[in-house]
């Protein structure tokens, strides 16, 4: 079948291929440029000469000017706080919606779905007020708090749980599992792909989240990478692309490396999250 | 659950704190200082250095410096901390935040904090034009620290190449236009000049307006003069540089990348903050000069930058300790060092009398331009509801520069908005 | 039996409670509180807060900046959504085939999704910088004069649109890839036997089957066009003269730079209404089974 198509369309096929690669080149151009600028001295940041000398100074300078390691640690802490709670809270809620046909569950579920539209980004003003009044401004927990109950996660898990045959639950019940036991022994293990999918989507979203952390953090001790980078690269101070590129690469490196290593899983996960 | 957790941890922290307090009895006063880092270079290191010197000298005071982004962020963060009950005793904030801080009842005047005659004398030791943005209703609320004016950087090599005298930079608007025409190349590889119009357009405009003999507002910050003929004329001149004289690119010019444009030789002249001086000095591969801004009817520039404020929500001891810290950081010798390391100006005549700055000015004369220009300086645009009024003026300036409105129309609109907002404050 | 039912209701609610509390605290309560705040003026020492009713909304309709940011948002949506969806479909069709270097292509297309907008904005600033920027350097090779891409009101929004398309197309590609993989390969074989062209096959078979995906992506893209403002902090701050300002950025400015919570609340209510209308439209016009059920 391939052969047939190829014969018929060989010229247009190679044109297509060239187009595909051109598009890919355009798409990674910003990243390529970041590599160029980060590893070259300032004067070559905007001049391109193939054999310009390489240097690591930009990384050293960026690290000495801003505590990127601390920022990275903060980002990690936000995720370490947020993701387990997201999964826990959503698992419980999804379980309730999938298997307990409780009074008002339909209305409750539609109220959950509201958050798919009205995401926390839109309510920054009021949520900042709430955080101030409970004294959680400038805390790691405060960055994560509005995102713990995730309609998206509840929805995904509910779909998965619903697709699990009831017989498995009955069997577990016969073996003496209680309500929570069934959740833990039957539903959670069978939903592992969904957990992985949501986790990867959530990690990449929160690693890159900017507006809300910008608003709620004040200090080096809580500021995540994106906000640190935003302050570091603020155009008010005059743009230095070599330094900014070095800082950018350091900030995206962990996620990018993870993505390159596990790109199949990433892509599959995003796909799975999308199909539901 | 979060709340209980927090309460628990607070409880633990409190008991640990009590246990420790006997051990660290000497750390009597703890100060939290908010600081805006908005300028190039490792500024935080310099400030950290000063703070640790201060703590070494005053073991009974502990200072936490919080670096909070640009001026706007620093103000928001500090105010938010105050509101949520977190400690904050002093801050460096935009000198033009004064009216808003007063409206929020957030700061105390220094007149209430200074006690001794020596301290009172210190209050009068700064350049008077730097105090303009720090005083209101007859009291002093802000002490200058990270201060700047706008100066004209020019590429001496480009001047020579264009047949201009590199040692006599343009001193009037006419000379500026003439020089600009000679410096602008036909192939578009070099522009005569650039005045940035993103970031802080109202600030640059303050200079042009003053050069045309006008100020943008009254002293009490409740009336603006955006639509006065002289002000409109100043904006027309700015626009003409691009559209009529063709010595500057049309459209807006990015504040953040302008220094790069200058260093790359894409423009022979740029107007920019003195805060860029050290960065330009370190990176320029050509001979450059720094001059006062040229005169229209007269010379003129607004001052700019950050002042020290003391917050109202502080104890008597904390205020005294804050004053001590501010006096330490504005001391002539330190101010001189600060100026050398950053390009910001020395804030008192005494700082320019120190050996450090004397020597520096001798070997690098541009360092004195900002000071010399103070004679012609005025306050930066500072009104009540300053954020909104600044934005409306910024929008008007940009609308004119990109050609979507005439100067009269844009400035009248901005003035109408300012009148509407400010009428409640008069 | 009755006991069982009771227990079921109770357990159901108990399991839902943690999520419910958080959702109420950070979604439902703020939605209502925002509306209430928009009816009161700001409080300050000089002027305490008072009830102003719909005055805030009158200000909103009289505010030219509001209309500007609103229309910018609409243009942004119109400019980004069709193009990024079109590109996403093309990308998905490419990497769904056994082309050489398929996994490289897939990584390349997907990379922007993994990069924080705030970081890449600085790099795009370099692309767009007049005279010294990459775009002008490349165009200069062809003898094209330099352009002030971000400093000109007629090019700044298109520049932002291009960057947004770059950011989103690869993300949407994933959903199409998922959609394509659910299409049975036999269909392709049948089409080939019939001798129908690929163009035909796409429009007659693949495209209709991808319709649910398209609707899902459409909603996502629409939401994103209102949520994504990170790059404005670096690229333009909404300028020149609000030519690239967007609703959410204007809300941020109003609340956190002008400290005008009342007006920021009115703006937020408008945005919420806009999203609510979209949600309702989706509810009525789009088969619900398509995405969320």
Image (cartoon, rainbow, N blue to C red):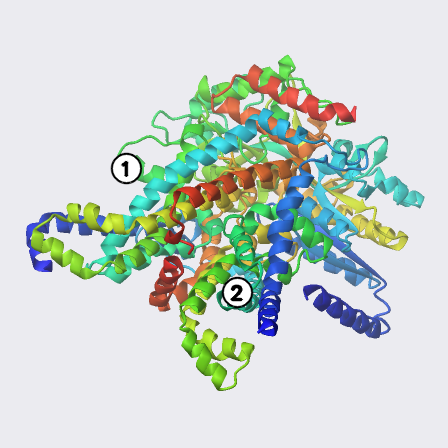
**Residue found 86% across the figure and 69% down from its top:** B25
Residue B340 visible in the shown view: no
Determine which of the numbered discs, if any, sits on residue C94 in the image: none
Count residues near mark 1 (Cα–Cα under 10 Å), then give few for <14, some for 14-19, many for 20+: few
- Farthest bottom residue in view: A175
Q: Looking at the image, which is closer to me, B121 or B200?
A: B200
Q: CA distance from mark 2 to mark 1?
A: 68 Å
Q: Is residue C174 left or right of residue B284?
A: left
Q: Is residue A79 above or below residue C36?
A: below
Figure quadrant of residue C161: top left
- Numbered disc 1: what chain? C
Please give the name of the residue rendered at 77% of the width and 36% of the height, measured from the top-left corner. Answer: C49
Judging by the rendered image, the residue that carries numbered circle 1 is: C141
Residue A132: image location, x then y, percent:
71, 52
Name the residue that disc number 2 marks.
A101
Q: Position of residue C213 (x, y in %)?
A: 34, 51
Q: Is residue B362 above or below residue C25?
A: above
Looking at the figure, which quarter contains the N terminus of chain B?
bottom right
**Chain at tag 2:** A
């Amino acid at each position: 079948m391939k052969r047939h198509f190829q014969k018929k369309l060989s010229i247009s096929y190679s044109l297509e291929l060239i187009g595909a690669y051109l598009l890919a080149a355009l798409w990674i151009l910003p990243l390529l440029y970041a590599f160029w600028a980060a590893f070259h001295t300032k004067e070559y940041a905007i001049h391109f000469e193939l054999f310009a000398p390489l240097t690591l100074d930009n990384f050293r300078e960026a690290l000495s000017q801003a505590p990127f390691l601390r920022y990275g640690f903060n980002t990690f802490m936000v995720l370490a706080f947020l993701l387990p709670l997201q999964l826990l809270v959503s698992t419980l809620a999804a379980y309730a919606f999938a298997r307990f046909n409780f009074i008002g569950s339909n209305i409750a579920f539609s109220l959950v779905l509201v958050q798919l539209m009205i995401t926390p980004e839109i309510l920054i003003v009021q949520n900042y007020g709430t955080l101030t009044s409970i004294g959680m401004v400038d805390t790691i927990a405060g960055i994560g708090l509005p995102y713990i109950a995730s309609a998206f996660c509840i929805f995904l898990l509910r779909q998965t749980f619903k697709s699990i045959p009831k017989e498995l639950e009955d069997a577990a019940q016969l073996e003496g599992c209680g309500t929570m036991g069934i959740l833990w022994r039957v539903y959670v293990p069978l939903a592992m792909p969904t957990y992985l999918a949501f986790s990867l989507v959530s990690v990449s979203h929160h690693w890159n989240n900017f507006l809300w952390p910008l608003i709620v953090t004040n200090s080096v001790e809580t500021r995540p990478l994106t906000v640190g980078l935003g302050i570091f690269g603020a155009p008010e101070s005059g743009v230095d692309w070599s330094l900014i590129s070095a800082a950018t690469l350091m900030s995206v490196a962990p996620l990018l490396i993870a993505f390159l290593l596990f790109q199949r899983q990433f892509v599959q996960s995003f796909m799975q999250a999308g199909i539901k | 659950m979060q709340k209980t957790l927090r309460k628990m941890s607070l409880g633990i922290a409190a008991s640990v704190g009590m246990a420790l307090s006997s051990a660290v009895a000497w750390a009597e006063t703890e100060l939290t200082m908010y600081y805006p880092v908005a300028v190039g270079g490792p500024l935080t290191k310099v400030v950290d250095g000063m703070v640790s010197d201060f703590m070494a000298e005053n073991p009974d005071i502990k200072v936490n410096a919080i670096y909070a982004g640009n001026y706007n962020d620093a103000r928001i963060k500090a105010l938010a901390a105050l509101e949520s009950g977190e400690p904050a005793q002093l801050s460096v904030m935009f000198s033009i935040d004064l009216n808003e801080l007063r409206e929020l009842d957030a700061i105390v005047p220094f007149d209430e904090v200074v006690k001794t005659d020596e301290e009172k004398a210190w209050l009068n030791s700064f350049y008077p034009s730097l105090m303009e943005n720090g005083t209101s209703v007859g009291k002093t609320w802000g002490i200058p620290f990270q201060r700047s004016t706008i100066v004209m950087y020019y590429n001496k090599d480009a001047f020579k190449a264009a047949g201009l005298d590199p040692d006599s930079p343009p001193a009037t608007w006419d000379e500026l236009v003439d020089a600009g025409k000679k410096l602008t190349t036909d192939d578009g590889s070099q522009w005569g000049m650039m005045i940035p119009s993103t970031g802080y357009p109202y600030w640059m405009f303050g200079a042009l307006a003053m050069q045309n003999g006008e100020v943008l507002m009254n002293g009490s910050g409740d009336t603006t003069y955006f639509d006065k003929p002289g002000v409109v004329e100043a904006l027309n001149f700015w626009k003409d540089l691009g559209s009529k004289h063709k010595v500057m690119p049309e459209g807006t010019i990015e504040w953040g990348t302008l220094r790069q444009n200058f260093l790359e030789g894409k423009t022979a002249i740029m107007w920019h903050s003195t805060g860029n001086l050290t960065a330009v000095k370190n990176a320029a591969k050509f001979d450059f000069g720094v001059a006062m801004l040229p005169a229209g009817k007269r010379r003129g520039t607004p001052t700019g930058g950050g002042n020290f404020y003391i917050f109202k929500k502080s104890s008597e001891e904390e205020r005294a300790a804050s004053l001590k810290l501010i006096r330490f950081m504005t001391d002539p010798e330190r101010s001189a060092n600060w100026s050398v390391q950053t390009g910001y100006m020395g804030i008192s005549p005494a700082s320019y009398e120190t050996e450090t700055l004397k020597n520096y000015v001798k070997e690098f004369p541009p360092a004195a331009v900002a000071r010399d220009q103070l004679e012609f300086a005025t306050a930066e645009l500072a009104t009540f509801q300053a954020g909104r009024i600044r934005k409306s003026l910024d929008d008007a300036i940009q609308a004119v520069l990109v050609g979507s409105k005439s100067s009269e129309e844009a400035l009248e609109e901005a003035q109408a908005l300012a009148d509407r907002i400010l009428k409640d404050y008069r | 039996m009755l006991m069982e039912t009771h227990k079921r209701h109770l357990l159901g609610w108990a399991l839902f409670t943690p999520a419910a509390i958080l959702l109420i605290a950070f979604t439902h309560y703020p939605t209502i509180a925002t509306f209430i705040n928009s009816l009161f003026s700001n409080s300050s020492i000089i002027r305490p807060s008072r009830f102003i009713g719909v005055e805030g909304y009158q200000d909103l309709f009289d505010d030219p900046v509001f209309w500007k940011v609103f229309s910018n948002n609409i243009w942004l949506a119109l400019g980004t959504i069709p193009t990024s969806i079109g590109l996403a479909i093309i990308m998905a069709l490419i990497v769904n085939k056994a082309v050489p270097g398929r996994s490289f292509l897939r990584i390349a297309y997907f990379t922007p999704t993994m990069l924080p907008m705030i970081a890449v904005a600085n790099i795009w600033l370099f692309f767009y910088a007049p005279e010294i920027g990459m775009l002008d350097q490349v165009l200069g090779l062809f003898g094209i004069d330099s352009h002030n891409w971000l400093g000109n009101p007629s090019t700044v929004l298109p520049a932002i649109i291009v960057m947004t398309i770059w950011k989103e197309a690869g993300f949407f590609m994933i959903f199409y890839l998922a959609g394509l993989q659910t299409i049975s390969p036999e269909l392709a074989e049948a089409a080939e036997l019939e001798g129908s062209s690929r163009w035909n096959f796409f429009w007659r078979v693949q495209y209709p089957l991808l319709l649910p995906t398209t609707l899902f992506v459409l909603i996502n893209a629409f939401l994103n066009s209102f949520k994504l403002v990170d790059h404005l902090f670096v690229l333009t701050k909404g300028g020149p003269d609000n030519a690239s300002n967007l609703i959410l950025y204007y809300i941020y400015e109003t609340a956190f730079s002008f400290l005008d919570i009342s007006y920021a609340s009115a703006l937020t209510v408008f945005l919420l209404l806009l999203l609510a209308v979209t949600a309702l439209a989706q509810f009525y016009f789009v088969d619900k089974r398509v995405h969320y059920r």
